[in-house]
Image (cartoon, grey):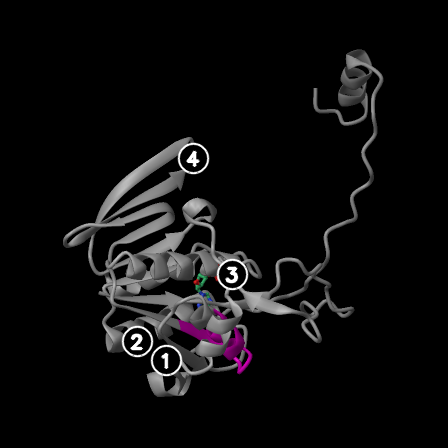
């Protein structure tokens, strides 16, 4: 079985994001970019499935500008076999990404697509669901456990109030939640080896997908700075503040 893992290049999760002074977007100049954390989990899971003998090949794909090749190399360094860079301008919307991934899935014919549940830049949480719908494949979202069986896959999902286990016919789309696994670090020898692994570049135009934006962002603004907390002397003071200052009682 081949596993396809879409990975997005986003502002590193340790960076404090700054909004541009004209409110037109987020400052990306000289900002550290990394693989989306949920996608790291997806790559780790795919590599573990390969190590367990349940997959033969892990192919990672990223859509965007040339910088995507850096995160593809990172994914190759932790065990992916092959990478595909779908080249286009950064900022493609989830529907456009899903349409391109559908075309790629038709070419690559993976048995499974494992991806992040959401990208931490726009927090859309849409691409996996749209991709499954466009392909007409079953979907298991917010997975905290994945167990491939003979011709199906059991996906345990994190839902409100507990866990739900679904059995999906393959091929299928699975999106990962935080507790699925703990991604490994790339070792130096593997980073060196990753430089020799195949990385193909495909222009989005070759896929014949129209990725013209359909959404116009009006304005970006940073959240208001929070005022510091206070300590209260006793329960009576807490209740009094909740009642008269916060007005929540
Ligand atoms: P989103 O719907 O934008 O929150 O993204 C959900 C998931 O879709 C991400 O975790 C990635 O696995 C995948 N994805 C989104 N955008 C891209 C992209 N430009 N390239 C590759 N994968 C992407």
Residue 201 position by quadrant: bottom left
167 in relation to 134, above or below: above
Q: Earlier in the sequence, mark 3 or mark 2?
A: 2
**Mark 4 burial class by Cα count in 10 Å: few <14, some 14-19, many 20+:** few
Which segment is the magenta one?
A: 61-74
> Which image quarter holds the N terminus?
bottom left
Of 128 and 214, nearer the camera is: 128
Q: What residue would you read off at disc 1?
A: 209
Distance, label 3 to label 2, CA atoms, is 31 Å
182 vs 60, nearest the viewer: 182
> In 3D space, how far apart are the residues under numbered discs 4 and 2 (Cα atoms)?
33 Å
Between the residue at mark 4 and the residue at mark 3, the CA separation in whole angstroms equals 31 Å
Q: Of marks 4 and 1, which one's residue comes earlier in the chain?
A: 4
The residue beneath circle 4 is: 160
Q: Residue beneath label 2, please?
A: 103
- Identify the secondary structure beneath mark 2: helix
* Residue 113, horizontal then vertical, whole percent: 31, 62
Q: Position of residue 122 (x, y in %)?
A: 56, 60
Q: Which residue is mark 3?
A: 185
């Amino acid at each position: 079985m081949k596993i396809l893992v879409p990975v997005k290049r986003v502002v590193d999760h340790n960076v404090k994001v700054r909004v541009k002074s004209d409110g037109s977007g987020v400052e990306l100049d000289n900002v550290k970019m990394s693989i989306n954390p949920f996608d790291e989990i997806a790559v780790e899971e795919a590599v573990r499935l390969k190590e367990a003998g349940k997959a033969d090949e892990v192919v990672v794909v990223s859509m965007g500008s040339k910088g995507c090749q850096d995160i593809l190399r990172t994914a190759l360094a932790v065990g992916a076999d092959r990478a595909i860079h779908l080249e286009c301008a950064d900022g493609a919307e989830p529907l456009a990404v899903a349409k391109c991934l559908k075309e790629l899935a038709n070419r690559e014919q993976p048995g499974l697509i494992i991806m992040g549940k959401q990208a931490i830049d726009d927090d859309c949480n849409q691409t996996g669901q749209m991709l499954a719908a466009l392909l007409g494949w079953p979907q298991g979202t917010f997975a905290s456990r994945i167990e491939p069986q003979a011709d199906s896959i059991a996906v345990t999902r994190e839902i409100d109030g507990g866990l739900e286990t679904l059995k999906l016919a393959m091929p299928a789309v699975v999106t990962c939640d935080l507790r699925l696994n703990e991604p490994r670090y790339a070792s130096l020898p593997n980073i060196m080896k990753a430089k020799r692994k195949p990385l193909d570049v495909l222009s989005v135009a070759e896929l014949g997908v129209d990725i013209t934006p359909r959404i116009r962002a009006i304005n970006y603004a940073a959240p208001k700075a929070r005022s510091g907390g206070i300590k209260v002397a006793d329960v009576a003071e807490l209740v009094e503040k909740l009642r008269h200052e916060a007005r929540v009682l």
